[in-house]
Amino acid sequence: MKTKFLILFSFIFVFFSCKGNDGKTVNKTDEKNQAAVKEDYSNYKEIQFNVKSDYEDNSKKNLEISFADFLFKIQFVDDRAYLKASFKNKIIKDFQQVVYNFTYDSDYFDAEKRVKIIYNGKDGYLFLPGYTEEFQNFTVYKFNNHDFKFNQALSLNSHNCKNGEIFLDHKNESFYMVDKVSKTKCIFSKEDAYPVSTKEVQQDLVQLQQNENKSGSSLNEFLADLNKDGKKDKISVYKNDTAKDDFDKTHFGLPLKVLLSSKNGSIEKSNNNLVFSNSSNCISEGFSTVATKDSYFTIEQQTCFDYILVDSYITFKVEGNEIYLHKYGETYFDKANHERKIPDKTWTVKEFGKVKFENVNENFLLSLRNR
C-alpha cells in the first residue's frame, strides 16, 4: 500500500510540474525551466546590431542596420520603405518594398528602436515594426548570406511582454517572446501580411537608383570579365551634377561604381573620389577613359599644376571579390617650356602597400607625388 501511495504521489508531482511549463509565466528562480525554454528554441539568439541613420535629407532619408558582415539599408520614399540586403559588400537582394511602420502612431526614431534580429551564426530573421492598433506586431524577413525574403507577419496580442526577447521554435518555425523582467511568455500569432503599395514602386526604384549614385546620371559604362568567371563585369562612370559647368560635370569629380558578377548575385564597389576635382591653376582635360585588360582596369585622366600637364593612370587589380590598387603612374608636359623633359613616375604596392579600391582617393594619390 505504501509503495502504491509513493507511485501515485510521484505521478501527481510530475504531472503538475510538466503542466507548469505550459503556463504564461516562467518562474524566475526555476533555472531548469528557463534553460528548457532556450533549448526548445535552438541556438537562435536576439543580437545587438549597429544603426546609422539620416532622416534630414528629404531625398535620401535612410536607415542602415549592420552586424557581422550583413548590411540592411532601408531607403524611405514618402510613406514607403525599400530595403537592400548585402553580405560582405555583395548585394544579395536589391531594393524591394518592405512593410516598415514609421508613420502610423510612430516616427523614424520610434520605429528604429523596435527593430529586432535573431541569428544563429548562419541565418536569421529581421523583425520590422508593423502597423498596429493596440498590440505589438512585426513583419518578419528571413535571411542568410545569399538570400533575403518575406517570411510572415506576426502579432503579439498581449501587453505582458513590453520588454521582451524573441525566441524561435525551429521545429515548426513559430516565435514567442519572454519578458526580460517578469519572464512572462507571450505567444505570437500569425497575421495576414499587410498590403504594400505597388502603384509607385517602379518610379520609386528609379529614384532610389539615382540616390545611390552621387549624381544619378550615367556618363559611360565599360564591360569586361575582370574576375574571370565567364561573365561581364561593369564599371560605371557618373556625371558630377554638382560641378559648376557642363564640361566639369563630365570630366571632374566623377563618381565610379564597379559591379562584379558572382554566383549568388553581384558585388558592388563604389568610389566618388578617384577622378580628380578641378582645383588646378591651369586648364586640363580631366577624365579621359577606363581601359581594361585581363583582371586589371585603369582610370586615365589629365590634371594640371603650375602649367605642367599631368596625365595620370590609376590601375587596379581584381582579386576574387576584392579590388586593390596595383600601381599609379604620371607623365608630364611643361606647357611653358615644350623642350623640357620631365621623367615619368610610377608608384607600386612596394611604396603604398595593399590598398582597397574604396579607400583610394585624390589626396592619397597626390601625396605619393609629394613624397
Image (spheres, rainbow, N blue to C red):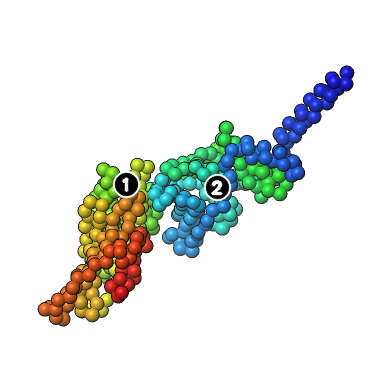
Report helix, strand or loop for mark 2: strand
User: Which of the marked residues, 2 or 1, is nearer the chain's N terminus?
Assistant: 2
Q: Give the image location of residue 56, x and y in percent.
A: 49, 63
Q: Give the image location of residue 2, x and y in percent.
A: 88, 21
Q: Residue at x 39, y 54 (%)?
A: 208
Report helix, strand or loop for mark 1: strand
Would residue 339 be found to the left or right of residue 252 on screen?
left
Q: Residue at x 53, y 39 (%)?
A: 152
Where the N terminus falls, by quadrant?
A: top right
Q: Which mark is residue 174?
A: none
Residue beneath disc 1: 261
Q: Residue at x 47, y 43 (%)?
A: 144
Where the C terminus falls, by quadrant?
A: bottom left
- What's the amino acid at mark 2? Ile
Would residue 219 be found to the left or right of residue 36 on screen?
left
10 Å crowding of disc 1: few (<14), some (14-19), many (20+): many
Q: Give the image location of residue 116, x and y in percent.
A: 57, 49
- What's the amino acid at mark 1? Ser
The residues bearing labels 2 and 1 have C-alpha atoms spaced at a distance of 29 Å
Would residue 6 be found to the left or right of residue 149 on screen?
right
**Residue lying furthest right:** 1
Q: Nearer the viewer, residue 175 or 134?
A: 175
Q: Is residue 36 above or below residue 314?
A: above
Q: Which mark is residue 117?
A: 2
